[in-house]
Amino acid sequence: MRNDNEGAADEIGPAIEEAIRFSYLLGDSTRWMRHAYDREMQKLGLTRAQWRMLLAVLHKRSPTQSELAEMLDIGRASAGVLIRQLEDKNYLQRHEDDTDGRVRRVRPSQRAIDSAAQMTDLGNAAAEKLFAGISPQDLETATQVLKAIKANARVGLG
């Protein structure tokens, strides 16, 4: 007598099996990438998440917490925790908006501005190691695939 679960793998099909293998590989790859960036940012006493937040503030110059959360695709509370951590390390400062006193903006401190080149160098060093031997064309293809997966995931969870 055949169990209903027997042969289930046979019914999945090769495309789904490949997608599952890809999902595991993607998860492993992103975990290792996070470790690589964390190792580099430790040289500045930062986590990768803090580094990303700093780069966003340096790029935007005076965003709100909500704008940062949206830019980084994280929750407002998570953005607030990162901002507070970076304030404690003297990388960021909060200040009132010039036109609306209810709005608080985040700006880089002098320490952040002075560290920007070193942060960029450390990030570039990690990226150079991580993407060694991968052509720009392959990276573009991978980027398009990951954007499609992200869009599908957002619709599916949405």
Image: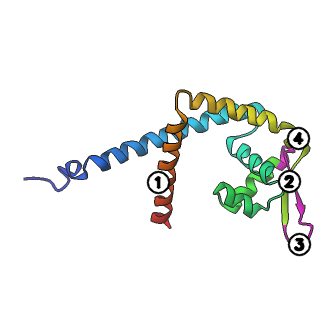
Residue 149, disc: 1
Please, what secondary structure does the residue beneath circle 4 have? Answer: helix
Please, what secondary structure does the residue beneath circle 2 have? Answer: strand
Q: Name the residue under label 3.
A: 100
Q: What stretch is highlighted in magenta?
A: 87-103
Residue at (58, 36) in percent of width and height = 33
Compare residues 138 and 65 and report the one nearer the observer: 138
Please, what secondary structure does the residue beneath circle 1 have? Answer: helix
Q: Where is residue 49 in the image (x, y as percent from the top left)?
A: 68, 46
Based on the picture, tell me whether residue 91 belongs to the magenta stretch: yes
Marks 4 and 3 close (CB-CB < 8 Å): no
| Comes first in the chain, label 2 or label 3 | 3
Q: What residue type is labelled 1?
A: Ile
Q: How far apart are marks 2 and 3 (CA)?
A: 16 Å
Q: Distance between the residues labelled 2 and 4?
A: 11 Å
Residue at (73, 49) in percent of width and height = 53
Farthest residue, direction front = 137
Decide: few, some or many residues near mark 4? Use Cα within 10 Å; few <14, some 14-19, many ≥20.
Answer: few
Q: Distance between the residues labelled 4 and 3?
A: 27 Å
| Comes first in the chain, label 2 or label 1 | 2
Marks 3 and 1 close (CB-CB < 8 Å): no
Residue at (66, 36) in percent of width and height = 38
Q: Distance between the residues labelled 2 and 1?
A: 33 Å
Q: Distance between the residues labelled 1 and 4?
A: 38 Å
Decide: few, some or many residues near mark 1? Use Cα within 10 Å; few <14, some 14-19, many ≥20.
Answer: few
| Comes first in the chain, label 3 or label 1 | 3
Q: Mark 4 points at which residue?
A: 111
Residue at (73, 43) in percent of width and height = 51
Q: Where is residue 28 in the image (x, y as percent from the top left)?
A: 48, 38
Q: Which amino acid does label 2 sit on?
A: Arg
Q: Position of residue 39 (x, y in %)?
A: 67, 31
Q: In this view, does 9 lie to the left or right of 24?
A: left
